[in-house]
Image: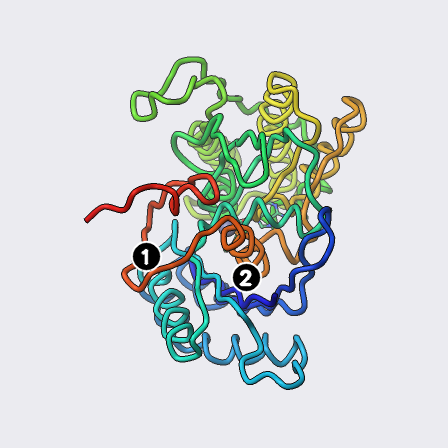
């Protein structure tokens, strides 16, 4: 079975062809994965502008899907080179999601193939399986990106128990905001990562936030696995302002290069330490046999390096996706779609984009009695 994946939840238009394999442990193979990034458009505004994002998806989607089909190569004697369409339903920017969903539904209708709506984070989690094969279960997975920082226990394939999540900024968002404070442009993650490699990670004392009490807005969670990154960002802002005053610099002037590297390294040490403490503590508590880190921030060099070292020390395999599968892409959506389809899920024509779609277990939506 071949599936066409489509992802437009944020600022990447992506389409991919993923094929099912006759292998229980390596269930899927990526045949193509095309990503058109909008970074150059949003950079001028210092962050993502939702309306511009939706419009650019409309411009790009036909070409991206055609290219994904071409890259995957022809399928002899078949008029439709895929058997299923998987598309991100949410969460994300609603206008952007709508472009992918409307396109996928139209294609499914006109080609007479089924489609399945996919949760974006289920996609990120399946990027780990695309990379390393089925995870040893139970696993604990950290999904960490520009829009999310959440920790899940995965006791069985396609089952996601949320252990914690950020109460304010996502880790990637904190990277992007700190980069802006340091005058490094958008997106901030890769450039802070690069500069941090040359800085002193103990130069600036920055606080770590440890939450111990349950969140009023999420009474289902114990609270002690939640994250908070807005205090860290504020501390960086305060430090930058103090240094400007001390150096008699104007309000918007960049700090000297060496100081920018030190702030980047110190910030990165705190973020990686906070994320990995939570991941490995949760893994111990959950009796995990493997851990994974998915999402755009999983591209971070220090997070990867420290995670592998901690995994080796704890005797736990650590899964991280290839760089091309860590940021948003449609191959992971196609993989999650295949899992959902095999669990009996089918999209119906009434499915709509949902900017704050909750992550449910694969197959659960199909088993639930439908409203109306
Ligand atoms: O998963 P993703 O492509 O989109 C969302 O679903 O949000 O993640 C994008 C985020 C951005 O905040 C970006 O700054 C961050 O991932 N990022 C990084 C790195 N590469 C991308 N953060 C830290 N270090 C990196 N190397
Ligand atoms: Zn993402």
Placement of 237 over or under 210, stated as above or below: below
Q: Residue 178: x and y, percent?
A: 50, 41
Residue 102 occupies which quadrant of the picture? bottom left
- Kindly tell me whether mark 2's CB lies below 8 Å from ligand 2: no
Q: Earlier in the sequence, mark 1 or mark 2?
A: 2
* Left or right of 357, for residue 179: right
Q: Are there few (<14), some (14-19), or many (20+) residues within 10 Å of tag 2? A: many
- In percent of the image, x 51 and y 33: which residue is there? 243
Where is mark 1, residue-wise? Answer: 353
Secondary structure category for the residue under label 2 = helix
- The answer to which of 8 and 288 lies nearer the viewer is 288
Q: Position of residue 159 (x, y in %)?
A: 52, 36
Residue at the spot of label 2: 330
Q: Are marks 1 and 2 in contact (CB under 8 Å)?
A: no
Image mark count: 2
Density class for disc 1 (Cα within 10 Å; few <14, some 14-19, many ≥20) is many
Say the numbered circle drawn on residue 82.
Answer: none
Query: Which percent across, then down, holds residue 352?
Result: 30, 58
Quadrant of the rendering where the N terminus is positioned? bottom right
Examine the image and state in which quarter residue 268 appears.
top right
Instruction: Write the residue at 19% across / 49% down.
Output: 372
Q: Nearer the viewer, residue 244 or 208?
A: 208
Q: Is residue 320 left or right of residue 333?
A: right
| Distance Cα–Cα, label 1 vs label 2 | 16 Å
* Residue visible at 75% across and 37% down in the picture: 305
In x, y percent, where is residue 97?
37, 60
Looking at the image, residue 322 lies above or below residue 143: below
Residue at the left extreme of this rendering: 372
**Residue placed furthest toward the top:** 212
Label 1 residue SS:
loop
Measured along the vertical axis of the image, is residue 310 above or below residue 256?
above
């Amino acid at each position: 079975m071949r599936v066409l994946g489509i992802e437009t939840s944020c600022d990447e238009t992506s389409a991919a062809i993923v094929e099912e394999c006759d292998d229980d442990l390596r269930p899927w193979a990526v045949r193509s994965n095309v990503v058109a990034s909008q970074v150059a458009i949003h950079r001028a505004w210092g962050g993502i502008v939702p309306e511009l994002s939706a419009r650019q998806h409309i411009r790009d989607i036909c070409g991206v899907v055609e290219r994904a089909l071409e890259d995957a190569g022809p399928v002899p004697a078949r008029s439709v080179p895929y058997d299923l369409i998987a598309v991100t339903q949410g969460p994300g920017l609603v206008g952007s999601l709508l472009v992918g969903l409307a396109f996928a539904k139209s294609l499914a209708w006109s080609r007479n193939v089924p489609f399945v709506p996919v949760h974006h984070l289920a996609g990120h989690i399946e990027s780990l399986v695309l990379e390393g094969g089925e995870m040893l279960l139970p696993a604990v997975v950290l999904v960490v990106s520009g829009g999310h920082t959440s920790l899940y226990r995965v006791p069985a394939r396609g089952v996601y128990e949320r252990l914690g999540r950020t109460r304010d900024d996502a880790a990637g968002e904190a990277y992007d905001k700190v980069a802006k404070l340091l005058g490094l442009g958008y997106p901030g993650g890769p450039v802070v990562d690069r500069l941090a490699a040359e800085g002193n990670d103990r130069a600036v004392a920055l606080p770590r936030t440890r939450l111990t009490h349950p969140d009023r807005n999420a009474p289902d969670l114990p609270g002690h696995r939640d994250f908070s990154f807005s205090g860290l960002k504020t501390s960086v802002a305060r430090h930058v302002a103090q240094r400007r005053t001390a150096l008699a610099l104007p309000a918007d002037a960049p700090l000297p290069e060496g100081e920018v590297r030190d702030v980047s390294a110190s910030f990165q040490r705190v973020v990686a330490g906070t994320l990995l403490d939570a991941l490995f503590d949760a893994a111990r508590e959950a009796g995990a046999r493997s851990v994974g880190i998915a999402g755009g921030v999983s591209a971070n060099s220090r997070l990867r390096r420290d995670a592998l070292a901690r995994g080796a020390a704890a005797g736990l395999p650590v899964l991280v996706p290839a760089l091309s599968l860590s940021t948003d892409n449609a191959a992971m959506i196609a993989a999650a779609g295949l899992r959902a389809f095999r669990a009996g899920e089918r999209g119906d024509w009434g499915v709509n984009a949902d900017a704050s779609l909750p992550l449910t277990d694969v197959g659960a939506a199909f088993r639930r009695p439908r409203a109306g």
